[in-house]
Amino acid sequence: MVRRGAPRTPYVSWSAETGEYPWVGVYASAFVGNAVGLVAASAVASQCMDLGTRRFYRGQNACGAGLLLTTGVVMAVLPSFGGALGGRVAGSTPRSRGSLGRSVLYSLPVFVPGFAIATIHAGSNGLSGIELLGLAMVVLGAPALNTFADSAFRELR
């Protein structure tokens, strides 16, 4: 069996690294990556959803079940992937880098419920307090989990 690359390990000792983990820089990069993913996801979502009222189209403009499912998956994965990629780039060292897959998986459990909470009163004017909490989970919470996962789950180079 041929081995490719360095062995994967869920935990890397930061004492062997040349410096401290750059928490602020990684969070900022994950935040920007998440924001870029949100913009891209909004472009995809606008095919099946009125973003102003946060309601899915009905009638003639409605998406079919397959397209609606695909849109939903893309809406969840793009921001999580963007945040994970941003964190991985900023947190890479000459010795190790964050696990992209684990970082995506860590932010999804915050992003998906955050999006659902942010659309609780879809169609109403303005945002309620609970919807603002959902938006905070999506915009601030997901990059925080990307940052944590990037520091905790590393791959040796």
Image: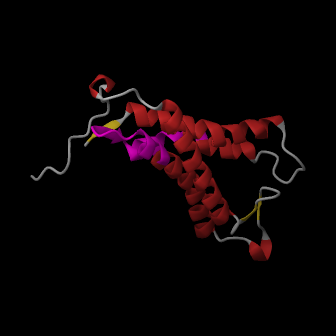
- Answer whether residue 25 is magenta in the image: no
- Answer whether residue 90 is magenta in the image: yes
Toward the front, the furthest residue is: 18
Rendered residue at 27%/35% (across/down): 9
Give residue 82's position: percent from left, percent from top. 52, 51
Toward the top, the furthest residue is: 15
Q: Is residue 85 left or right of residue 47?
A: left
Q: Is residue 145 visible?
A: no
Give residue 134's position: percent from left, percent from top. 71, 39
Give residue 157's position: percent from left, percent from top. 25, 43
Toward the bottom, the furthest residue is: 60
Q: Is residue 2 visible?
A: yes
Rendered residue at 61%/45% (across/down): 112
Rendered residue at 81%/51% (across/down): 122
Q: How is the image coloured?
A: secondary structure
* Range covered by the magenta-colored residues: 86-110
Quarter occupied by residue 110: top right
Give residue 43's position: percent from left, percent from top. 66, 65
